[in-house]
Image (tube, rainbow, N blue to C red):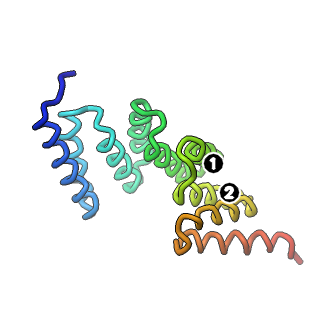
Amino acid sequence: SKKLLEQDKEDLQVLFHLARYHQLMDDSEKALNIFENILKIDKNHIDSINLQAHIYHNLEQIEKSNNLFQKVLGLDEHNRQALLGTAQNAYELNNYQKVIEITNKIKTIHGDDISSAALRGDAFYEMKEFDYARNNFYTALKFDGNDIHVLYWLGRSIFEYHSKFNMT
């Protein structure tokens, strides 16, 4: 693999930001096209591969998304974004145990964060482990006490937890 010239590196940054712009504007096709061009210049451009994977996740092409996240993890086995994306894909496939394993790995390597704790809470909720779900949602709230998703699922997990003991 040839070394990139300084101008090529600058061009990659500009292209990356252009692709990101199109992604944020919900123009997935254009963003994916630009990411592909970036990868022709630098086949291991991790940020581009990660964002491609997220686009495919949003397009519900989970297998393609997983393949790209695995490519990133092959380049950087501790890449937080790829680990979290893999966990999100596992959630979409109802593989909640895998979600918990991956988000625990993120917690071990990078420390906990709102996304990992909330996703782990979602997985425990789906497994009807409401006490564990509640604890993870409380952890997520430490990062953002106003996150509406976390507050909603925390309320649901508290309700379900108490409903288990108040059955008639």
Residue 113 as seen in the image, left or right of residue 20: right
Residue 120 as seen in the image, left or right of residue 52: right
Q: Which residue position is annotated with label 2?
A: 124
Q: Amino acid at mark 2?
A: Phe
- Element type where label 2 sits in the image: helix
Cβ atoms at labels 2 and 1 below 8 Å apart:
yes
Residue located 29% across and 44% down the image: 48
Q: Amino acid at mark 1?
A: Ile
Name the one closer to the observer, 148 or 125: 148
Spot occupied by residue 110 in the image (x, y as percentages of width and height): 53, 45
Spot occupied by residue 120 in the image (x, y as percentages of width and height): 61, 55
Spot occupied by residue 125 in the image (x, y as percentages of width and height): 67, 61
Q: Which residue position is annotated with label 1?
A: 100
- Element type where label 1 sits in the image: helix
Name the one closer to the observer, 135 or 39: 135
Spot occupied by residue 47 in the image (x, y as percentages of width and height): 32, 44
Q: Earlier in the sequence, mark 2 or mark 1?
A: 1
